[in-house]
Amino acid sequence: MKGKIEFLDVSEAVCVKLIMVTIDHIYEYYNILADKNESNNSPEAHESFQKLIDATKAGPKEKRLALQFIGRFCKNFPTEMTKALEAIFDLCEDEDITIRKQAIKELPTLVRASPETLPRVVSILIQLLQANDATEITQVQGSLLAVYYLNQIETVSEILNEIQRSQEDLLRKRALRFLCTRIGALDENDLSKDVEEHIIKKSKEIANYLDPEEFVTVIKLLSGLKSMQTLLTRQELVNMITTQCHLEEGWNGEDTERIAVVATFMNHAVPLLSKNVHSTRFVTFMLDYVIENVPKLSLSSDDKLDLFRILAEMCPYCGEFENVKERLGKLFDILLTFLPKPQPESVEQQASSINNETPNFQFSFIECLMYSLHQLSRKYPDFLIADENQEKMKDFRLRLRYLYRGLSNYTNQLKAAIDIKSDTDDQDEQKKSRLIAYKICSNNQALLRDLCRSPPSFKTTVILSWKPIEELKRSISESDGANGNTKDNISNKRVSRPEQAVYKPPGGKFSGDASNNRSTYTNTKNRRGYYQRY
C-alpha cells in the first residue's frame, strides 16, 4: 500500500513537470518565431511552427496557448497551412467547450492568411452550427460573418452549396436561418447588389433540393432583399412558388398533405402580388380542383376556412382566365351551400326571428366566398346577369336577404358589446374577438348589398376580417360612417400584410389561429423526393 502511494506521488510530480516544460517550450517557439519575423524561411522557424502545431495535442493549457500563436504566425508558413488547418479543425471538436470556442474563433484568421482555405473553413463552420450550446453557436455565427466579410460571394456560395449537399435536417435549417437573420438582415453597405444577385441566383439553383419548410425560408430571405423589390423580381419569386406548387398536375381532391403544401406556398405568394403581378394560376387551380372538395376533406373547420381565405386574398390580383362560366359557376354553387334558403314564416314568426334569433350562418366562410365572387365578378360582370343564371340569382337574393336579417341583429349586439370598456385582460381578448366578428358581419353586409342590386354592383371595397386589429378598428369606424352612403365604400387603401412567421411544421394537417394566422404545411417526411410524386 505504501509503495502504491509513493508511485502515485512520483507520477503526479512527473505530470506537473511535463506540463511546465511543454508550456515553457511553447513560449520558446513563440520567441523564435517573433525574433525571426523577417526570416521565416529558416529551418529553425519552420521547426518551431511545426512544434506549435504538435502542441495542439497536449493538455488544455497548451492547446489554448498554441492556438493563439498558430493564428498569429500561420500567414508566414503557407506550406504548413494544411497541417495547421487540420490541427484547428480537431480542436473544434475538443471535449472542452472553451477550447472549441477558441478554435472556432481562430478559423477566420486562417482564411485571412490563406484565402484558398475558405471553402473548407465555411464547410466546417456550417457543420458546427449543429452544436447544442447557445454560446458556441453564437461563436460559429460570428466566425462565419468574419469569413463573409473576407469574401462575400464565395462565402454565400459555400453556405448554399453545403445546404444542397447535406442530408442533415438541423444543419440545413440552421444554415438557412443564418442566411436569413444574419446575412439577409445586413444593410446595403454590407450586402451589396452583386451579393444579393448571387444569393438570388444560387437560391434558384438549389430550390428543387429544398423541402417545403426550407423553401419557405428561402422565399422569405429573397423577399426581404432590396434587389427583389421591383416588379420583375417579384414576378420571378411568384414564378418560383408556382413551380414548386406543381399546379399543372392538379389535385385528386383527397390528398390533404399535398393541398397543405400548396396552401403554404400560396400563403407566401400573396404579399408579392399586385395589379401587375397576377395570381391567375393560383386562383384557377383553386377553382378547378379545391373549393368544391374542401367540405369533404378530413380537416378541421378552421383548416377548411384557411383554404377559402387564401382564395379570397388571391382574387383581387387575378388576371383574365378561360372557362369563366364553369369556374365562376363552381364558386357560386359553393357559396350557395353556405346560404340556407329561408323557410316560409308567418308575420309573427318573422318578427320574433328579427328580434330574438340569429340564423345559424357560417359568417366567416360566407365572407371568404362572397368576397371571392365579388372580386372575380368585377372582371366578368356578365356572369351574374346571364340568362341561364336568372333563376339562380332570384334564389340567391332570397338567401342574401335572409342572411341580412341575421347579420343586422348580430351586428347590433356586437357593437354594443364592443363599446363596453374592459378592465381585465380576459375582457380585452373578448373585445378583440368581438371586433373581428363585427368586421366579418359588416363585410358581409357591404358585399351582399352590392350583389343584391339589379344588376349587381361591384363598387364596395372591404378590408378582410383577418387583417391586423388596428386596420379592423379603422375600417369599422369607416364602415359605420359609410352606412348611410349608398356606395358603401369602406376603404380604397390596400393594407400592408402582417409579418409572416418563419414556416414551422405543426402537429396536424394545418395549424394556427384561424382568425389571424394561416395554417402551414405539416408533414415533411419523404422530403427529398416529395415533389417527384406530383
Image: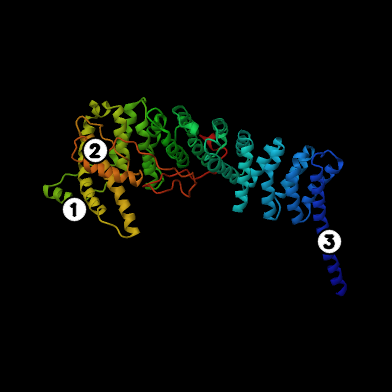
Left or right, 396 with respect to 16, comes to: left
Is disc 3 placed on a helix, strand or loop? helix
- Gap in angstroms between the C-alphas marked 2 and 3: 92 Å
Q: Which residue is mark 3?
A: 17
Residue at image x 16%, y 51%?
355
Q: Is 304 situated above or below 99? A: above
- Crowd around label 1: few <14 · some 14–19 · many ≥20 (10 Å): few
- Crowd around label 2: few <14 · some 14–19 · many ≥20 (10 Å): many
User: Which circle marks residue 356 in the picture?
Assistant: 1
Q: Residue 222: give x, y in percent of width and height.
A: 50, 35
Q: Earlier in the sequence, mark 2 or mark 3?
A: 3
- As shown in the figure, which amino acid type bears the numbered disc 2? Leu
Q: Residue 155: give x, y in percent of width and height.
A: 62, 37
- As shown in the figure, which amino acid type bears the numbered disc 1? Asn
User: Which circle marks residue 448 in the picture?
Assistant: 2
Is there any visible trace of residue 68 in the rendered image?
yes
- Gap in angstroms between the C-alphas marked 1 and 3: 95 Å
